[in-house]
Image (tube, coloured by chain):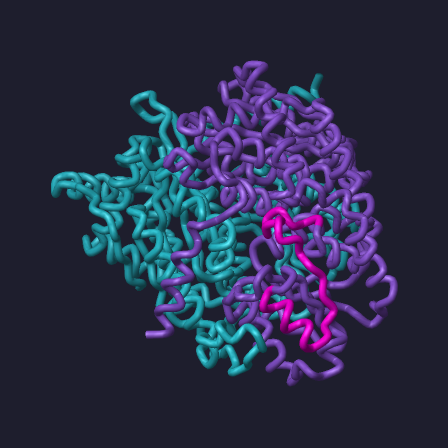
Chain colours: A purple, B cyan
Amino acid sequence: MSSVEHFFKSGIIESDIYGAYEAIIEESSSGDIGYYTLPEDMATLNEIKDFCANYDFEAIKNVVVIGIGGSSLGTKAIDHMLSHTENRNDKNLIFMENVDPNEIERNLKDVKFEESFFIMISKSGGTIETTSHVKYIVDKYGISFEDAAFVKHFAIITDPLSPLDKFAKDFALTTFHLPLNVGGRFSIFTPVGLLPLRILGYDVDKLLQGARELKKSFFDKHEDTMIQKAYYYANNQERLPINVLFSYSSSFKYFNDWYVQLWGESLGKINRDGNRVGLTPIGIVGSVDQHSFLQLIIEGPQNKTVTMIKVEDFENEMMIPDVTIPHLEKTNFINNHSFNTLINAQCDATMQSIKDQGVDVDSITLPRLDEHTAGGMIMYYELLTSITGYFLNVNTYDQPGVELGKVILKEKFEK
Amino acid sequence: MSSVEHFFKSGIIESDIYGAYEAIIEESSSGDIGYYTLPEDMATLNEIKDFCANYDFEAIKNVVVIGIGGSSLGTKAIDHMLSHTENRNDKNLIFMENVDPNEIERNLKDVKFEESFFIMISKSGGTIETTSHVKYIVDKYGISFEDAAFVKHFAIITDPLSPLDKFAKDFALTTFHLPLNVGGRFSIFTPVGLLPLRILGYDVDKLLQGARELKKSFFDKHEDTMIQKAYYYANNQERLPINVLFSYSSSFKYFNDWYVQLWGESLGKINRDGNRVGLTPIGIVGSVDQHSFLQLIIEGPQNKTVTMIKVEDFENEMMIPDVTIPHLEKTNFINNHSFNTLINAQCDATMQSIKDQGVDVDSITLPRLDEHTAGGMIMYYELLTSITGYFLNVNTYDQPGVELGKVILKEKFEK
């Protein structure tokens, strides 16, 4: 896929590389952790494609994803990365995530029920935000679960045999299952991502293909740069507790958010030795954040690594025209160059200025933004997270720390 | 304004509080740093109001702010905080920030020149993103600087006597000045923020009033909690290098971004003792980010402080209706409560779960979201930044670290 360059030495020895490969190969072949094999799951892909081919989406203007965290971030990431591509149709994609009433109102302002396709996503069905949204929606539109309109306009994505699955079965709703061994933040290549992305017109085959190729390249042991990076990050987590993703395109805005969840929630743990470990993810966008966060990277404490993401070809010829603004002639050096050239030159110049400070930098360059490279990027970061979790000796796939708040919340209302 | 609670002990002694007050009073009265007196600048406020009263904004559908960093983040923050309020009219607010060609295309897709009011903002005029956008716009719409349409539809905000100011003068453009002693990230109460916000219908008097009251309360020495917090953050910057703002409303999404710039760029510095200092800001939104970042706060390394922001009254009565989803009856505890109640209960429960881990937490509760509380919040964080900069012994108001990248960029093109 993309080219990767590291500008720091990991200090890893051969046997540690070997050990990490063995651990990840074992984890992926054990069947305990299911995300590794999702790019090969053609049965689910075909189920999604068949459903989309047989459903009349002509009259559907809005795709409303009701889900939070891992149920929304991946779809949002990929749609924003690829929204300028020609595959994308003109349906609105709306996310019901927060329980902020003003946001809910804004989200549904122009949404008519019969023009919309709602996808309710929850592994168990117990997510309080998601159920509250569904209750509000059926009440607002005066729909009951028995109505044919409800059955037609709602789909459910959940674990097999979960309470939500039973609800879906009782009312004969369109249902897609999440594999039990795939957690929310690793679920983009399940129906969680594939269903909405397919409805929006994206080439989901190519998405999985990109993921497969990245994965193959790793398991063929051609990607030990990933192991080196994971090793370095894990071993320097006290000195370098912050990992900045500096993405040079606005298209990565929500990819950054997806990365923040994946990295933060997977690695921030009390590990198997009883120690608090973890790495703090930060996602920023260039060139915009040269004007906000860069100063801190350059002159602040050297407690950060930085990964630059660059898109070689934006597939957009837009030029900075040969216009002179009187008194601002010194900006003319950029005239007659493309915006594509400008943003990439900014990326290179910023990277140089960061490296000059001795900050540990690596870069990932994508040839272009399409389903193929997007699928590869998702798989790259999922694998990197798994390897880093191995070195940190954590359970990468659970999130025990968020349970307490849920218990306290429930107690507040039951008192 | 709002109520503030600290759940940690700062350990500050009386003489340090006194010293900080003295330093900030001296800085604000010296005239070197101009942001302190902006809320009292009625001349500028009236200039803006007069302009808006005399310009025919009827036919204007789009307000296009061409500016980056401090020229856009403040306006975006306040508009997003208040976009649900009744003062906000229905004009589109569009920001030309990044030089990503796909974003530029998306931004201008439905923009007709004669329906739009463009505001070009740059202290010097040399910002390469901003000038490139302006060149692209005049070329795209076939406008020349001499045209009456250009003069009518463009306004300039810049430093007095800057190259951009000279350009504006040559073509008799509507011009507002930034005070020379106010930097971009502290400029929201200058025309940078006041002009677009007034055009969008906001009550800018009330915005400044909120800022004035917060400021008065500080200078009347009723806000030494701010000094305590700044002292604690500065003195523990090595142990606690990360300051998380956990805002419980989607309305704060861009306030968080504004905070990130203000905090990161002001404090990340080589200080007067020659040491690299700084604090890494992170902005997250509840309840959404309970499902992404919370796990890391709860179980990860204890290297973070957390500030919870809560809105008491969303002024929106939206209820979770009394609907039972079969098999999901355990979510019924929330039925017949408002979304307002739910999100605030989540904020309280999450705060409790974070405090229980021994994390240093404080909370800011706003009675509601309006111009008055928004103005107060901006002033609170500006003052907090100044005080923290005092304790870190940095120049809070410059950004020398971003210059090198600009030089390298220019060299790339001149070679």
Residue B190 at what x, y percent from top left?
45, 52
Q: Is residue A338 above or below residue B372?
A: above
Task: Identify the residue at horizontal 68%, vertical 32% (top origin).
Answer: A310
> Residue B59 or A103: which is nearer the viewer?
A103
Left/right placement of residue A321 relative to residue A144 reads right
Q: Which residues are magenta?
A: A162-189
Where the C terminus of chain A falls, by quadrant?
A: bottom left
Q: Position of residue B397 (x, y in %)?
A: 39, 36
In-image side of A53 versus B273 (left or right): right
Q: Position of residue A133 (x, y in %)?
A: 57, 71
Residue A163 position, x and y percent, is: 58, 68
Q: Residue at x 54, y 44 (%)?
A: A397
Q: Residue furthest left?
A: B14
Using the image as rendered, state which of residue A240 and residue A67 is in the foreground: A67
Image-based side of A39 in relation to A124, left or right:
right
Q: Is residue A179 magenta?
A: yes
